[in-house]
Image: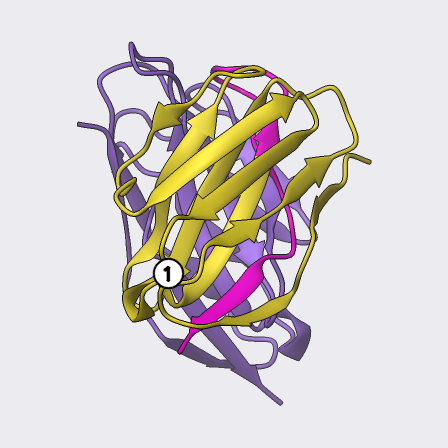
Amino acid sequence: GDSVTQMEGPVTLSEEAFLTINCTYTATGYPSLFWYVQYPGEGLQLLLKATKADDKGSNKGFEATYRKETTSFHLEKGSVQVSDSAVYFCALRTANQAGTALIFGKGTTLSVSS
Amino acid sequence: DVKVTQSSRYLVKRTGEKVFLECVQDMDHENMFWYRQDPGLGLRLIYFSYDVKMKEKGDIPEGYSVSREKKERFSLILESASTNQTSMYLCASSLRRQGAYGYTFGSGTRLTVV
């Protein structure tokens, strides 16, 4: 079945460091791909998305490019801030016979120190 | 912006109690979802619904049921709460079944069963 695998955390960085969180997927169809962020004590918020190959999603300085050839959707940010400390979830959504619930990775915790 | 509202942020219930978790969305979204979130396990889908009075089992439906009598409201019911149902419960809604539409999440209900 469809699945998402993301790098295990926690990821610990200093402020202004470069961030990469790896995400790869397995899907039978042509999924849409998402990154969600969860700040402490809150629900998940959509960070960015891409709906077809080579699309780049971007928001708040974060970027991810839909790479069909490597089935990847890695999240990057050039200079992280303390306020970026959160849990990040990669997810995919594709139509199938049972309907289309989002499938999530297990999440990667990012901790940024000043 | 679409809002998804979960009735309680924190709940403490006793083993064996019947527990109702309520979720309301203020747009005309067709799809609604219940997930539970546990450390190391990520988000796991409990139930989802495509429309009023429709429901589909997710990955872990045992011990839960749902009700969707109105389009805007999706209730999760723990028939007889047990300590292994202590978790963060997240409700989400989505406009369409497939592809490019992500979810809007509520803030979550942290349930403790004692």
Please state the horizontal and vertical placement of residue A71, each as a whole percent of the image: 27, 32
* Quarter occupied by residue B94: top right
- In this rendering, does residue A55 appear at all? yes
Percent across and percent down for residue A47 are 61, 46
Question: Which contiguous range is marked in magenta?
Answer: B93-114
Residue receiving disc 1: B81
Number of numbered callouts drawn: 1
Q: Is residue B29 left or right of residue A30?
A: right
- Residue A102 visible to the viewer: no
Q: Is residue B6 magenta?
A: no
Q: Name the one closer to the observer, B104 or B80.
A: B80
Colour seen for chain A: purple
Residue lying furthest right: B1
Residue at (65% x, 65% y) in the render: B9
Q: Quadrant of the N terminus of chain B?
A: top right
- Identify the image quadrant of the C terminus of chain B: bottom left
On screen, A10 above or below A69? below
Q: Position of residue B63 (x, y in %)?
A: 30, 47
Where in the figure is residue B25, as x and y percent of width and height? 72, 34
Chain B as rendered: colour = yellow
Identify which amino acid the numbered label 1 is placed on: Ala
Q: Residue at x 62, y 41 (%)?
A: A58
